[in-house]
Image (cartoon, helix red, strand yellow):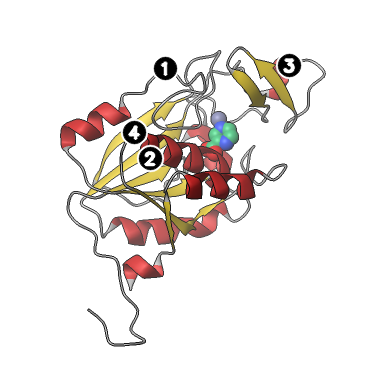
């Protein structure tokens, strides 16, 4: 309870999970798909992680000839789209190629108690923004099974990028019946062709909560 004017902080329970999405060198300044300001959220994520006893990470993890790369589509440039068997796919610069430096999770992320790293996007012919399922909306990663078996509380999602992997992970979590919160200032966006505004609209409609870190950290 607070006095009028006090800032009410959100209580994190031991069952709640912090999901840290794709804090990898290719999404940070200097990387091949750098997200503006991506490095600014790393200290904040480290601080938030101290409040959670259960933290999991996701890692974008592609073969060198991944279908989401513009380089695999002659005549196409990054950020254009193409039609694939599962729908419209944004084409990206080559990024997060497995076993390259760009795919590594930033060493500035200091979360020794993180318990699971879920890799996604390893199938050559299917992209996977979401930590739960691939872009064909069929192939599951197993994350929902893991979380179900651990009997978790609310999922708090942070990381990169707000409008792609964070949003798709949040939407799938909500669709799977989890309570979901995105901590907005602990994310940064790519914002290509209106993708950020669209992502927030979709998340709002799906019942995803939107908070800022001060509401948790006090
Ligand atoms: C992502 C584009 C392509 C992300 C991953 O982490 O948001 N975006 N692959
Ligand atoms: Zn990717």
- Assign a secondary structure to mark 2: helix
- Specify whether tag 3 is near ligand 1 (CB below 8 Å): no
Pointer 1 residue: 139
- Kind of element beneath mark 4: loop
Image spot of residue 25 (x, y percent) = 53, 41
Between 49 and 153, the one nearer to me in the picture:
153
Q: Position of residue 146 (x, y in %)?
A: 24, 30
Q: Which residue has dot 4 on it?
A: 176
User: Which of disc 4 and disc 1 is earlier in sequence?
Assistant: 1
Whether ligand 1 has any atom under 8 Å from the Cβ at mark 4 is answered as no
Which mark is drawn over residue 73?
Answer: 3
11 relative position to 90: left or right = left
Q: Quadrant of residue 152?
A: top left
Q: Which residue shows up at 31% across the image and 37% down it?
A: 177
Mark pair 1, 4: CA separation: 14 Å
41 versus 205 height, above or below: below
For the residue labelled by badge 3, is the local secondary structure a helix, a strand or a loop? loop
Q: Which residue is mark 2?
A: 174
Question: Furthest-front residue in view?
Answer: 205
Instruction: Report the Cα–Cα distance between label 4 and label 3.
Output: 34 Å
Q: Can residue 153 be seen in this snapshot?
A: yes
| Cα–Cα span, label 1 and label 3 | 23 Å
Q: Label 1, secondary structure: give it.
A: loop
């Amino acid at each position: 309870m607070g006095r009028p004017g006090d800032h009410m902080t959100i209580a994190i329970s031991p069952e709640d999970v912090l999901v840290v999405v794709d804090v990898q060198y290719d999404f940070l300044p200097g990387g091949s798909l750098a997200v503006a300001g991506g490095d600014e959220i790393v200290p904040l994520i480290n601080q938030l992680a101290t409040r959670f006893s259960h933290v999991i990470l996701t890692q974008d993890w592609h073969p060198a000839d991944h279908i989401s790369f513009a380089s695999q589509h002659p005549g196409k440039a990054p950020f254009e789209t193409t039609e694939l068997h599962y729908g419209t796919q944004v084409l990206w610069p080559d990024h997060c190629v497995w076993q390259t430096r760009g795919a590594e999770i930033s060493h500035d992320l200091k979360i020794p108690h993180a318990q699971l790293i879920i890799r996604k996007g390893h199938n050559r012919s299917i992209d996977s923004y979401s930590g739960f399922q691939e872009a064909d909306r069929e192939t599951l990663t197993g994350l929902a099974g893991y979380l179900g078996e651990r009997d978790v509380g609310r999922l708090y999602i942070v990381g990169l990028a707000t409008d792609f992997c964070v949003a798709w992970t949040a939407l799938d979590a909500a669709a799977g019946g989890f309570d979901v919160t995105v901590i907005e200032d602990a994310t940064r966006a790519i914002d290509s062709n209106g993708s950020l505004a669209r992502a927030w609209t979709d998340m709002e409609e799906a019942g995803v909560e939107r908070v800022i870190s001060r509401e948790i950290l006090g």
